[in-house]
Amino acid sequence: MKKNLFLSMMLLAASTVFTACSSDDDPFVVENGTVTIEMPINVSQVVLNSFEGTVTNVQSGEVTRLASPVKSGENYVVTIPSLTEGKYNIAAKGNISFVKDGVAGSTDFEVSSSDVALNEQQTAVKLVVSSFKAEGGFVISEICTTGTLTPQNKNYNNDAYFIITNNSDVVLYADSIVLVESQFQSGSSGQQPWSPDVRPYAIPAGAVFMIPGNGKSHPVQPGQSFVIANNAMDHRTANENSYDLTGADFEVYLDNGGNSMDTDYDTPNLEYIWCYTQTIWLPSVQQNRSYAIARMKENKETFLANHSETPTYTASTGKLMESKQVQIPNEWVLDAVNLGTEDDFGWFVISETLDAGWVAGRANSKDTTQRGTAVKRKKDSAGKYIDTNNSTNDMEARQVPSLKK
Amino acid sequence: MNNIIYTALLLLGPTENPALMTQAYQKPFTELSLTCDYRHQSDAFRLEQGTGSLLPEVSVESYIRLTPSSVVWGEAAYGNGKHYDKRFNNVADFDLLYPDVIADSLGGDTRRERYLFSGGYATENGDWRLGGELKFRAEQEYRTVDPRMRSIVSDLTLRAGAGRTIGRYLTGVSAEGNIYRQTADVDFYGEANSMGELQMTGLGTSYVRFSGSNRDIFYEGKGVGATLDVQPLSGSGWLAHLSHALHQYERLSDEYNSLPLTTLYRQQTALTAGYRSQTAAGERALLLQAAYDKRASDEHVVGSASGQDYPILAHLTMYRQQRWDVSAAARYGHRAWHLQLRAGLLSHRETYAYVERELSYARLYGELTAQWQKAVGRDLTLNVYGKGGYAGRISDKLLMPYANMTASIRDYVNHNYRYQKASYASAQTGVRADYRPQSWPVGVFGQAATAWQFCSEGEHEANLHLSVGITF
Amino acid sequence: MRQKTIYFALFVLTLLSAACHQDNDDYMTQATLRLDGGDTLTIERVQAMAHITNLNTRHVVSTADFTGAETRIELLRGAYQVHVEGLLSYYGQDGARRVRSFRAVSDYVELVGSDTSKADLNIIFLD
């Protein structure tokens, strides 16, 4: 009896061995799972230039590299070779080019997703590339058109320049950007009942010069600027109070069909689209015109054919006055700044939707103290230029020109 | 020690029911002893418990028969020792409180000081027996270099029991209550040494929000237990012992206005059943033993503080551990010899709910014990024993979200797992000599024992136990 | 007598097992996060990544699955910090459709409902 008891007890103990063991089901293997890299909806013509992606199995720590994505509609899709089901951390980085608001740009991106489940029920994962900001774009950061005074107190007006800055976080291309000067001046004497009044839909432009290029010729890094000079020479040789503009990126040159009165310096020239004069262009020393930058959306011939209205009005003398000009559509405009005389601001020469305010360049028509100063855009605490489309708030006059040495 | 070894083989282990102490020992005794225990592991089998310890202790133990029907017993002990290279564990009583401990990866040696007092009384009256016992332990564990941990423990247990003779059997029930307190602080005296302390929550996880500069915690614990015993009064018969205990330990943070971070719930149930046959020459017994140890740690999900009050949003049982130990033992005793063969299965499983982690292993073990006890001459008694055994791994599993773990936690979990899933061969031997000539008022004893464990990973553990003392 | 002992023993056992701790294992909640742009706009489509960080464990879960202005995700019950950033297209009061960059952030959101829970996040436009 005792022997049987002992035996049965051992058997009881032994049986627990088998019940305690449990077998694991083989884990499900996800075949042809997909990772969709979704491109931002506010840009177009997106091209993925480079891509590096990994999926890391949270449990094993095993890292699997992702293959190059294939374009599928607006987005890109990566097909993952077989992966065991489980939770994954997905990371991707690369570079995309895009067109936003007409301006071409490119940017690096880095995006990740943590603890994503990949299993029988969920074989598709989405990563969204939208966290970069293509906002801001190009802004006019400095207008220096007041000219300078020579040591003999004579006026020197050849040294005007404009500085345009990429105020966004992405690389933008300056190709096809035009510098625009308004046809009209903002003093009360400049205000006339022109008809048609193009301002609600376009800038009445007296000078339009375009940065040439094939679309990718002139990349501007985030935060970087480029200088457009009227004459890209070292003006200090002519007037020691002036600036050295040989470092400018572009210059304005009117070649007048080969019969130019302008001087062509070494700096690349802007392409002449339209100017009220064929001889020499002089930006507003009186600081009472508006300046803008816009993105040219048509080639020169088409543009001139489509946007060359000539507004008119009948003067009190009965004479029909004409304004020979071109129009830059407001939708093409990237940034605009109104300038005026402090005691005589008569009217907005461009649409107020482009710039709701204005900067007082000089105190009155006799004021010469603004010479040798520049109008500059303010910066915020993060180092970005402030652009609320209101120059009263955004710009400051009588600043030290940044190119003054 | 002598009596304990003897009765451990004869009965079912130290009895938990104070009412049954009236017949625990054949003769009253008082024993004053000085012991020293030394342990050394070539590589820490469990990082939290370190690579070894040196624990000298002086103690006095007494069992006195007041009247033929009542006994009183007591013990007092003081020990002051050292633990070596404890890591990821800055509290005392790790075995009691894990995984809810405060920890860092540096650790180091610790000093431990312990006071133990216990006393009890039991009486018989006809068929009935009654008994009560009180146990108190105060312990301090500290480190004198950064990170300076300091833990102070007070542990009080009260037991009451009743027994009744029914026919040939003695049955007993007992209940116990326990109150536990521990304060655990970690300080850094050198500013450059300062590092974050982790509030561990199981399997390498920690309560990240309250880890770091939160270095002062305290534990509040309470528990209840009950036992049921059936023994033959003498001679042969069935044996049964059932014990069930529930404890909970709440970990609170001093720096966050006594905010409870986690509560550990522990359930321990053990059952021994068998049959013993006793004759004048010797005895035979067959026993089946099953022990179940379950731990569950509830994390208190804390919301946003308004002033000094932190609301608890939810309680989630994130950590669970279940441990089964089932074995069968056969005993044979003849005159001076006693032999025991035991075989069993140990199954251990720990899980953490989210993000899922699991650690489990099972071992099949067998051991053989031999003991020889004999009076040599009139004055000398010798007690020699030896034991050999093997515990072999039969299954293991580890599931960890390695991608989310830092390197030091990864190494910590992998290190412990390496030894948890290993197989072990063990050997023990010891001898105790009691010498009491008739002319002496007291007797003296000396004991030496050594135990070794060899791990399949190539590492080993050595234990040494020495004690001397007087008995009267 | 023996029967009585057995019954007594069983009684004690049941008592003891009833006192055992009940595990709290309703861990997860189905959380719905809704982007709130106010009454003036109707959100058409959201293209954004949401990163949800558990304040107690600092575990991060991400999703880009938006249905309209909402995203649904299974989370461990607890308190979270939510960060959503991306683009959304909406119809303004004038009926015009616009696409703008936005960010919706909350430093503290309680998602502790046993089955479901929800939170609203206010949108701020970045441009």
Image (cartoon, helix red, strand yellow):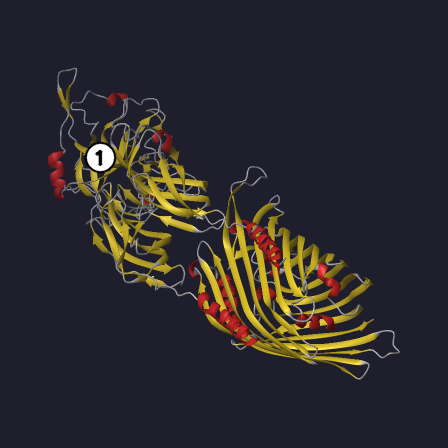
Q: Quadrant of the N terminus of chain C?
A: bottom right
- In front of the other: A125 or A350: A125
Total numbered circles: 1
Q: Is residue A381 left or right of residue B438?
A: left
- Residue B45 position in % (x across, y down): 56, 70
Q: Is residue A329 left or right of residue B351?
A: left
Question: A116 and B439: which one is in front?
Answer: B439
Question: What residue is shown at x 66% (from left), y 62% (from top)?
Answer: B145
Seen as rendered, the residue at the extreme bottom is: B377
> In the rendered image, is residue B187 in sight?
no
Q: Residues within 10 Å of mark 1 (few under 14, many from 20)?
A: few
Placement of A266 over or under B360, stated as above or below: above
Find residue C83 and report its horizontal and vertical position in percent.
Answer: 40, 44
Report which residue position mark 1 lands on. Answer: A331
Q: Nearer the viewer, residue A213 or C12?
A: C12
Q: Is residue A395 above or below residue A218?
A: above
Residue B36 image offset from top left, x and y in percent:
72, 72
Q: Residue at x 48, y 51 (%)?
A: C57
Q: Secondary structure at mark 1?
A: helix
Looking at the rendered structure, the kind of residue marked 1 is: Glu
- Tell me the quadrant of the picture where the C terminus of chain C can be found: top left
